[in-house]
Amino acid sequence: MCGIVAYIGSKPARGLLLEGLKRLEYRGYDSAGVAMLNGGMHVARTMGRVSGLEELVHKDEQFNGTIGIAHTRWATHGEPSERNAHPQGDDAKNGYGIQVVHNGIIENYSSLKQYLKDKGHAFTSETDTEVLAHLIGELYDGDLETAVQSALREVTGAYAIAVLCEKEPDVMVVARKGSPLIVGVGKDEYVVSSDSSAIVAHTTQAFLLDDETVARLTRDSFRTTTVENVELTPEIQELEYTLEQIELGDFEHFMLKEIYEQPATLRICMQGRVDAVDGKIILGGVADFEEDLAKAKRVLLLGQGTALHAAMIGEYLFEGLAGIPTEVEFASEFRYRNPIVEEGTIAIAVSQSGETADTYAAIQEAKRRGAMTLGAVNVVGSTISRETDAGVYLRVGPEIGVASTKAFIGQVAVLTMLATYVGRRHHLAGEDMLDALNSLEQIPDHIETVLKQSDHILKVTRGVVNRDNWLFLGRGTNYPVALEGALKLKEISYIHAEGMPAAEMKHGPISLIDKGMPVVIVATKGSQYEKVIGNMEEVRSRGGHVIAVATEGDSEIQSHCDDVIFVPDVPEPLQPLLTVVPLQLIAYHAAVLRGKDVDKPRNLAKSVTVE
Ligand code: G6P
């Protein structure tokens, strides 16, 4: 998704901005640009990679300034092109040398564009951002802050922006609504970004801009106001993530690093929350709502992508452990239905970033209809985490790889803890709770056991990596795992894959199976084991190549499949925390074997902040 980095201070801004943009590359983008004030306004934009932008500006003396704004764009209005890249400026002839970088979407841009055209403005791009730049120019009367405030009062939609003006070479104005923006505070300098990873190299002190808030920055001062010009006092906080955490270390790719981090991050996620000795779950983030949770009659789980798959596992957990009727739904569908939200409904938004536009809108809709809202979110201070009544953070640290892995484990773990917590206040017997917690505490060690088989998984993957169509099958809690396995493979290796409940295969997809087609089947010991074995035979008899994920010690399985990857034996509700790991590794190895850019898959964004 689009990324913003901006700097005002006494250091050369060029290197700092480019380095910041590189840190945001993982979010996905198609073009990049920079504007700098240095005895005039200087702008460079390019299609493609930040390294291309670097080539454009690195020898150019004009870009030697100490105040600048930079951007990576992921096209929403207008095709990816140099012309549509940011920064976008105001009117070339009659303007004031205003330049804007923008994340989000200005929804009423076409009516604003018409209004500006009627006033004689000429546009050079198809972007909504250029309209905003022109509007700021139109309203400019010698003070950039006032012009930005006035312009933002006219726009509807979402934005995070950074603005420069040639007439005020020592001022930067930034603002946000519905799209994140953080202002890092250094000594006589400010680093602004849509993502803390671009800031922590310079300062760990920062303030988050609230919705519809504007900040005017000079080298040694800042002032924040609402768009109505009411002065505010933001709270400066310590940024959570250290630079070390976001660097790659010895791993070749962030995705692999994050897969290997899963045991450690899961331990952190459960630390102080799971007390297997006294049989207790302690969740500080929802403690004030214990009574509401005890009275819950219905649970509604909302998310997109990987988060939705975690939510689907949550459905089994809330129904199985807590005995509460539970529904799970794509947030994007829920928000546009006319959903019936009964009294006593708890709506849970599941999201790594806490910024996914559909998930945010859906949880707001649930709230409007009377639900109590919770967030199962990773990014502290993100929009969803702030807008829900309460929540439980995933605590898995920053996830850089576009394909989500450790966040999935965190989401499933948080939903397991929540279901157990709520369940104990409903029907879950103390003894069963104790068993569940004991097993949960051992999961990180078990994940380590699975990770040790990476070489074996590589070998298995190599055997089938040239095949372009795969199936992933599972039953019960392992059905969403099958969906997740297929999604991972699609995302990073571009192999076509379908995930489905194992029984569904017979209703159509079985016709696809031909000699050697890879079919990955989660066939761990549990209530549906025999049935899954039946499905494996159906695949094998049609020549499919079966890769089974099975329970350690299952001596029978080998006779039903071509390859097997074993995972430790754990109770059924907790199996997804283990069975997903071999599927993550299959996808990773397949992408590397096919020579794909694992951390920056084509067309994908880490955080989808538009509908
Ligand atoms: C994008 C990402 C996925 C992620 C989904 C939901 O599609 O590429 O990895 O699962 O958004 O994101 P969220 O931040 O809400 O978990």
Image (tube, rainbow, N blue to C red):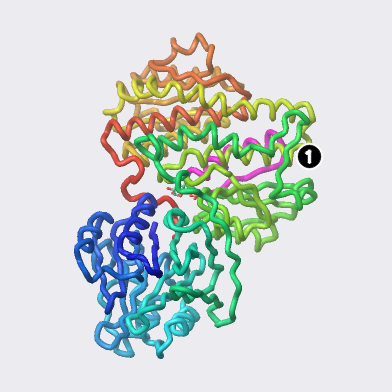
Q: Is residue 437 left or right of residue 532?
A: right
**Image quadrant in which the C terminus is located:** bottom left
What percent of the width, then of the height, locates residue 22? Answer: 34, 53
Give the structural element (helix, strand or loop) at label 1.
loop
- Would you place residue 1 above or below residue 68 in this image? above
- Would you place residue 550 above or below residue 183 in this image? above
Q: Is residue 50 visible?
A: yes
Q: Is residue 72 visible?
A: no
Q: Is residue 319 magenta?
A: yes
**Image quadrant in which the N terminus is located:** bottom left
Q: Residue at x 53, y 18 (%)?
A: 551
Q: Is residue 560 magenta?
A: no
Name the residue type under label 1. Answer: His
Q: Is residue 184 left or right of residue 21?
A: right
The segment highlighted magenta reads 306-330
* Helix, strand or loop for the magenta stretch, by majority: helix
What percent of the width, then of the height, locates residue 19? Answer: 34, 55
Image-quadrant location for residue 343: bottom right
Q: Is residue 378 left or right of residue 582?
A: right
Q: Residue at x 41, y 32 (%)?
A: 508
Query: Dot 1 corresponds to which residue?
Result: 426
Q: Residue at x 49, y 69 (%)?
A: 176
- Would you place residue 184 above or below residue 27 in this image? below
- Out of 296 and 395, give the one closest to the viewer: 395
What percent of the width, then of the height, locates residue 450? Answer: 49, 23
